[in-house]
């Protein structure tokens, strides 16, 4: 388990922020208008949390724990009883056997190319960690063929540089992963180089806190040189989530956010969601290092490897 806690530490350094204004998070289920798109979104699962089923031969069980345990979430918080993984990221299909996620979900720092490192060999991807039409989350009796192993990391980069405790030179944070088999019956996302402008509505699909798939909407707060800042509701585990424009195209990858997403409830030994105003100018608890509030997504237009692969113009 030591390796799992190490990954947890590394992922926490890229924790994404909080809830802005009204909490519009929704579980993604077959009745949702974005469900078809969301079927191509996957959660990263540590392989030692995938076990042979004890009840259904030839299938797998996922070892999960409620968010009250993995994140010490207060029982009064939304989704607190949902199953979750201690360590996770989100990824999404960009081709039948290619998946994209955040760079820090595939390399500790710097870059790797055409390599099967421990981020590849120690984890798998699962696309159906979501609610069914009755709101139930299936974690047992999973067909083995529905869990996808990483063959290699085609290109991953995590190169942001802390200049000081309050200044970071934000650079690349993306990964393109080749899976060992083609993902059938799911449609890869359409990518776009066009960046939405401040005020434009945007949507995020992903696995906040390693929990089942959710959707959140918000709008762009600002366009920065190497990232777009928005007020979608996101948390640890959302790293690697696709950011969609109004056409359902992916314009960016969620990579980080400020301030901390969970804060300790005064007088109690549990956490509550850190809440910010819609403009991202104030929060219940500000960022301890004074970073600018908001969710950061790396624009697709800055990832040259996608152009080399012919996946974007």
Image (cartoon, rainbow, N blue to C red):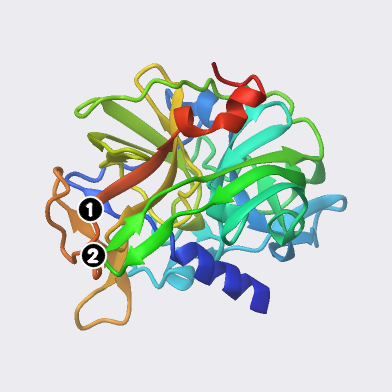
- Label 1 crowd bin: few (<14), some (14–19), many (20+), radius 10 Å: many
**Residue position for label 2:** 287
Q: Nearer the viewer, residue 146 or 239?
A: 239
Helix, strand or loop at label 1? It is loop
Residue 133: mark in rendering? none
Q: Nearer the viewer, residue 275 or 34?
A: 275
Q: Look at the picture and state if 192 lies above or below 124.
A: above
| Quarter of the figure with residue 247 | top left
Q: Residue at x 48, y 41 (%)?
A: 241
- The total number of labels drawn is 2
Helix, strand or loop at label 2? It is loop
Q: Nearer the viewer, residue 23 or 157?
A: 157
Label 1 to label 2, Cα distance in Å?
A: 7 Å
Residue 273 picture location, percent across and down = 28, 61
Q: Residue at x 44, y 55 (%)?
A: 160
Pointer 1 with pointer 2, Cβ within 8 A: yes
Residue 229 picture location, percent across and down = 28, 41
**Residue position for label 1:** 293
- Label 2 crowd bin: few (<14), some (14–19), many (20+), radius 10 Å: some
Q: Is residue 295 visible?
A: yes
Q: Is residue 89 visible?
A: no
Q: Earlier in the sequence, mark 1 or mark 2?
A: 2
Q: Residue at x 56, y 43 (%)?
A: 101
In the image, is 240 to the left or to the right of 263? right
Q: Where is the N terminus found, in terms of image quarters? A: bottom right
In the image, is 46 to the left or to the right of 236? right
Q: Nearer the viewer, residue 110 or 3?
A: 110
């Amino acid at each position: 388990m030591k390796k799992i806690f190490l990954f947890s530490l590394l992922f926490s350094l890229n924790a994404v922020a909080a809830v802005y204004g009204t909490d519009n998070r929704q579980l993604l289920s077959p009745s949702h208008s974005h469900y078809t798109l969301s079927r191509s979104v996957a959660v990263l699962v540590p392989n030692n949390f995938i076990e042979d089923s004890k009840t259904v031969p030839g299938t797998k069980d996922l070892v999960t724990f409620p968010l009250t345990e993995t994140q010490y979430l207060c029982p009064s918080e939304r989704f607190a009883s949902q199953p979750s993984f201690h360590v996770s990221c989100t990824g999404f299909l960009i081709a039948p056997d290619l998946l994209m996620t955040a760079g820090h979900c595939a390399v500790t720092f710097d870059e790797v190319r055409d390599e099967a490192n421990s981020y590849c060999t120690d984890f798998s991807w699962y696309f159906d960690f979501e609610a069914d039409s009755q709101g139930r989350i299936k974690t047992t009796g999973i067909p083995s063929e529905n869990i996808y192993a990483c063959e290699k990391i085609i290109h991953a980069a995590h190169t942001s540089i802390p200049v000081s405790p309050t200044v970071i030179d934000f650079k690349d944070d993306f990964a393109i992963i080749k899976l060992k088999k083609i993902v059938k019956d799911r449609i890869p996302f359409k990518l776009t180089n066009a960046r939405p402008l401040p005020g434009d509505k945007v949507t995020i699909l992903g696995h906040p806190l390693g929990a089942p798939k959710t959707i959140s909407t918000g709008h762009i707060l600002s366009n920065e040189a190497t990232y777009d800042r928005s007020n979608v509701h996101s948390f640890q585990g959302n790293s690697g989530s696709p950011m969609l424009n109004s056409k359902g195209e992916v314009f960016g990858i969620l990579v980080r956010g400020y301030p901390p997403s969970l804060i300790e409830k005064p007088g109690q030994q549990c956490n509550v969601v850190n809440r910010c105003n819609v403009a991202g100018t104030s929060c219940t608890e500000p960022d301890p290092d004074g970073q600018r509030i908001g969710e950061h997504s790396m624009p697709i237009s800055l990832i040259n490897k996608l152009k080399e692969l012919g996946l974007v113009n």
